[in-house]
Image (cartoon, rainbow, N blue to C red):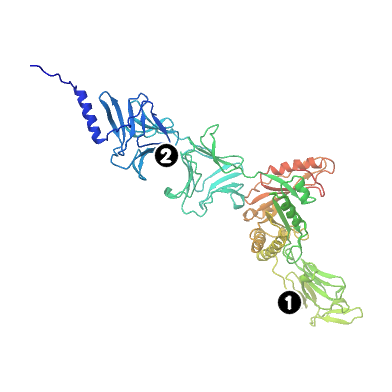
């Protein structure tokens, strides 16, 4: 009997065949045209995709992966018994038809507007997906596998420890700046405040010195500023529940980010720390640097032509009565107009001399004794009060200079010929003509009377024993009280604000500064005052200006000794230091900064310098300019020889 030969199948071949048949059921069948050629690509990049019928082939052609028409994405191995499925997305029977590598590193299978499968592995740089010779499908980011079908998502290796910073001017990777803490570099301070705002200051931490902020003031809760490892600088609310501000610098290649407050005031976020930090990925920008301008220059236009970066000028001097400042002299308006016409951003400081309260330093009284007389043109004076027998025959009591607006009282005898006012022994005060005709009298009597002009503004006759018998019944506000100083500052501030608004310019001064020299050069009566009077007058000045024009910035200035003696650092207004250079025609002696003159309200220096009269004038001016700039303030001016003009 003859036997028919039969095929012999090894156990291994049988298993492979069974697997192949099972794959055809579970994974779907590789249809005609879906088997790729050996020349098919083995990888594709970010935002690229495989659609139905497209495939990948491993470099050795041992494996291929295809996007099948049944919605399944399958990897096959080529064997001598056929193509054997080794892995799939398990999405047969769905509408999926596109495998895409997204920009976030996620490999996703899409169809009919939805996702049917995803790798759920994420990264953001140098992304690709490839089919390897071992049959593994791998997603790679910057040379590192982040997912494969054999392993799933691959966690990145732990990062190296963050280099921390112990410097007072910097924050290192994963370090935290807590509320109340700050960075300091030279005159610059970056402070995380209690109101939730992170603010960069040039000088002490007062509002007038702020040059940059996160704008998060009034944020509730105790905040933290965190420099994250991903390079993002984030301001968090308690428990990191929300982030009201961040630099938005994650994903910019930071490895060990480093925040540095530099000596030039620029706060910079670098990718990495070290002696040579990596590239900057964020910065606040350097604040405007210290410059020195001119005060009382021959003209504002000439100052601009000569290149001076700031201009200061006096708008008017003070007056002895309301409104305590004279009418504008025209120079301040001319300065604003010249700056406006230049089209440049040139700081403009508008100074106004304001007089102090009448009789601020008034003491005692002025007396016309028994049988004594005032003749035409003579007077009694005490403090800023004057009682004068005028040439027109009128006896007038003035509070301040002898102008109608300052009149407190008079006999109303002008034009009636009065030439002599007598304090008679019977107590009657009588105004006589040259022919001894009486044109006015007090009509009150008392033995051995005197006439007294008092600091309270009253003109009184007293009989012997001090009994008052007659008075004008006039008064002036109590001198020297904070309320009086505040009222005068308020009236002057309103007057000045109205004057500036009346210029009709598109621009406004950077500062409207009270010059306390008063009239005549009495420092507004503040030399005889104290901290309360200084604070009250400046508060009145500020309130008066703001009540007319909220866009103006009130300020004031004084000497260094006054700054210390009257605690002017406590006044929350921009302040300017008045200093002076010494020396002669050959020597320049710079001013010395006094210890303790370092408050946060100081904005600049007003320096007075009268240099040599020879050809070295401008050279010494430049030396003085450099000296003032070294004090580190932003708004500085220098006044030198009248009529002298030098290029900046």
Q: Nearer the viewer, residue 409 or 527?
A: 409
| Vertical side of 617 occupied by 553: above or below | below
Q: Image quarter for residue 550?
A: bottom right
**Residue 592 image point, x, y percent:** 71, 44
Is residue 65 found left or right of 369 in the rendered image?
A: left
Frontmost of labels 1 and 2 is: 2
Q: Residue furthest right?
A: 435
Q: Nearer the viewer, residue 138 or 429?
A: 138
- Say if residue 559 shows up in the picture: no
User: Crowdedness of circle 2 by 10 Å Cα count: few (<14), some, many (20+)?
Assistant: some
Q: Nearer the viewer, residue 98 or 326?
A: 98
Question: What residue is pinned by disc 1?
Answer: 473
The quadrant of the rendering that contains the C terminus is: top right
| Vertical side of 401 occupied by 447: above or below | below
Determine the secondary structure under disc 1.
Answer: loop
- Say if residue 348 shows up in the picture: yes
**Residue 100 image point, x, y percent:** 39, 38
| Vertical side of 184 occupied by 541: above or below | below
User: Crowdedness of circle 1 by 10 Å Cα count: few (<14), some, many (20+)?
Assistant: few
Q: Earlier in the sequence, mark 1 or mark 2?
A: 2
Is residue 292 found left or right of 152 in the rendered image?
A: right
**Residue 644 image point, x, y percent:** 81, 47
| Number of numbered discs on residues | 2
Is residue 443 found left or right of 224 in the rendered image?
A: right
Q: Give residue 104's mark.
A: 2
Alpha carbon separation for disc pair 1 and 2: 89 Å
Q: Nearer the viewer, residue 217 or 456?
A: 217
Q: Residue furthest top?
A: 1
Determine the secondary structure under disc 2.
Answer: loop
Residue under the image location 30 percent in, 26 percent down: 78
**Residue 215 image point, x, y percent:** 54, 51
């Amino acid at each position: 009997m003859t036997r028919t030969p039969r095929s012999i199948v090894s156990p291994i071949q049988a298993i492979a065949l069974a697997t192949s048949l099972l794959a055809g059921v579970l994974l779907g069948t590789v249809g005609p045209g879906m088997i790729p050629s050996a020349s098919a690509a083995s990888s594709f990049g970010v935002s690229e995709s495989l659609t139905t019928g497209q495939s990948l082939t491993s470099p050795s052609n041992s494996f291929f992966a295809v996007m099948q028409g049944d919605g399944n994405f399958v990897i096959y191995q080529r064997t001598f018994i056929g193509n054997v499925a080794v892995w799939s997305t398990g999405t047969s029977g769905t509408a999926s038809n596109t495998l895409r590598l997204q920009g976030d590193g996620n490999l996703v299978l899409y169809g009919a507007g939805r996702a049917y499968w995803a790798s759920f592995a994420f990264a953001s740089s140098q992304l690709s997906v490839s089919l390897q010779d071992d049959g593994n499908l791998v997603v790679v980011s910057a040379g590192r596998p982040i997912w494969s079908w054999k392993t799933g998502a691959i966690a990145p290796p732990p990062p190296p420890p963050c280099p921390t910073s112990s410097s007072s001017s910097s924050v290192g990777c994963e370090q935290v700046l807590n509320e109340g803490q700050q960075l300091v570099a030279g005159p610059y301070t970056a402070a995380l405040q209690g109101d939730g705002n992170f603010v960069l200051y040039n000088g002490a931490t007062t509002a007038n010195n702020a040059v940059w902020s996160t704008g998060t003031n009034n944020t509730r809760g105790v905040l933290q500023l965190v420099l994250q490892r991903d390079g993002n600088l984030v301001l968090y609310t308690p428990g990191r529940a929300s982030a009201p501000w961040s630099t938005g610098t994650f994903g910019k290649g930071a490895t060990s980010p480093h925040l540095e407050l530099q000596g030039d005031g620029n706060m910079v976020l670098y990718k990495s720390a070290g002696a040579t930090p990596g590239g900057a990925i964020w910065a606040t920008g350097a604040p405007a640097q210290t410059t020195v301008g001119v005060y009382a220059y021959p003209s504002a236009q000439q100052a601009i032509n000569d290149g001076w970066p700031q201009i200061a000028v006096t708008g008017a001097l003070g007056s002895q009565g309301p409104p305590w400042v004279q009418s504008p002299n025209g120079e301040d308006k001319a300065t604003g107009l010249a700056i406006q016409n230049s089209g440049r951003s040139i700081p403009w400081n508008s100074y106004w001399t304001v007089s102090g309260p009448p009789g601020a330093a008034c003491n005692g009284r002025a007396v016309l004794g028994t049988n004594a007389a005032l003749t035409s043109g003579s007077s009694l004076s005490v403090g800023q009060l004057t009682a004068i027998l005028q040439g027109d025959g009128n006896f007038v009591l003035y509070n301040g200079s002898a102008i109608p607006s300052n009149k407190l009282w008079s006999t109303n005898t002008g034009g009636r010929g009065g030439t002599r006012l007598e304090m008679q022994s019977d107590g009657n005060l009588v105004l006589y003509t040259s022919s001894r005709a009486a044109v006015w009298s007090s009509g009150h009597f008392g033995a051995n009377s005197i006439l007294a002009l008092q600091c309270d503004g009253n003109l009184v006759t007293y009989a012997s024993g001090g009994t008052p018998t007659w008075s004008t019944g006039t008064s002036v506000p109590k001198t020297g009280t904070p309320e009086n100083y505040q009222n005068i500052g308020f009236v002057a501030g309103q007057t000045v604000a109205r004057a500036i608004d009346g210029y009709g310019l598109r621009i406004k001064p950077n500062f409207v500064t009270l010059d306390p020299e008063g009239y005549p050069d009495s420092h507004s009566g503040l030399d005889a005052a104290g901290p309360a009077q200084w604070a009250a007058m400046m508060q009145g000045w500020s309130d008066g200006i703001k009540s007319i024009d909220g866009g103006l910035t009130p300020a004031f200035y004084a000497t260094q000794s006054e700054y210390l003696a009257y605690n002017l650092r406590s006044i929350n207004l921009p302040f300017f230091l008045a200093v002076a250079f010494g020396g002669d025609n050959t020597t320049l002696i710079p001013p010395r900064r006094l210890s303790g003159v370092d408050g946060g309200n100081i904005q600049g220096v007003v320096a007075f310098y009268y240099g040599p009269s020879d050809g070295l004038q401008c050279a010494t001016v430049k030396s003085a300019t450099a000296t003032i700039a070294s004090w580190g303030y932003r708004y500085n001016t220098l006044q030198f020889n009248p009529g002298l003009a030098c290029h900046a």
